[in-house]
Structures are given as structure tokens and as C-alpha cells.
Image (cartoon, rainbow, N blue to C red):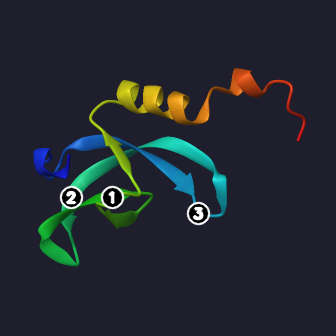
Amino acid sequence: MENNLKPGEVVYIIIRNPHAQDVAQVQQAAVVENPDNPSELALFAHETYFPFSEEFAVFKSEEEAEMAYKEAFGTPEEFDEFYG
């Protein structure tokens, strides 16, 4: 997908919390030039640059990202009986 993106585009990614690997969320990110390698693109989210990699599922729309998130992680209603 990286080849289809241009700097300045807004995309949506599924990103895991680095402190709790079982927590993930859909996050808006900007496509930017990689400051470490201007010939490559990177994602900018949470005031951090992320090089494109297999770690990120990148979607053009929030709806696509939300659907993929639900497929991968389910919905909160599915866990109503979990008390932790």
C-alpha cells in the first residue's frame, strides 16, 4: 500500500500500545517523508515517526480500519462477561 500513498495523506492504522501488547486501537496518522531517509515515506502519529513496516495495518478510511479491528480483536460487547 505504501506505493499508493503520497506525503500529506491521512490514513488510519491499527497500532498496539507498547506497554500493553493486548491493547490496540485505530489511530489516525499522516503520511510524511521519513526524516531519517527523505527518499522514503513514514507514518506520523503520537508525535512520532514510524517507518512503514509489516507491524502496521494501513487503511485509507476509518471505516476500513474499524472493520479490520473488529475482525481481529472483536467488539467490547463480546467481552461483557469478562471481569478481569
Residue 30 horizontal/vertical position (percent): 28, 50
In the picture as drawn, the residue positioned furthest to the bottom comes out as: 36
Q: The residue under label 2 is which amino acid type?
A: Val
Q: Position of residue 42 (x, y in %)?
A: 25, 62
Q: Is residue 33 left or right of residue 83?
A: left
Q: Residues within 10 Å of mark 3 (few under 14, many from 20)?
A: few
* Distance of label 3 from label 2 (alpha carbons): 22 Å
Residue picked out by circle 2: 32
Dot 1 corresponds to which residue?
44
Q: Are marks 3 and 1 in contact (CB under 8 Å)?
A: no
Few, some or many residues within 10 Å of mark 2 (<14, 14–19, 20+): many
Determine the CA span between mark 3 and mark 1. 16 Å
Q: Amino acid at mark 1?
A: Phe
* Front one among 54 and 65: 54
**Mark closest to the chain's N terminus, 3 or 2:** 3
Contact, mark 1 vs mark 2 (Cβ under 8 Å): yes
Relative vertical location of residue 8 with respect to residue 82 in this rendering, above or below? below
79 shown above or below 27:
above
Vertical position of residue 27 compared to residue 41: above or below: above
Residue bearing the label numbered 3: 18
Instruction: Say left or right for 78 vs 66.
Output: right
Which of 70 and 17 lies nearest the eye of the viewer?
70
> Which residue in the rendered view is the most extreme toward the left?
39
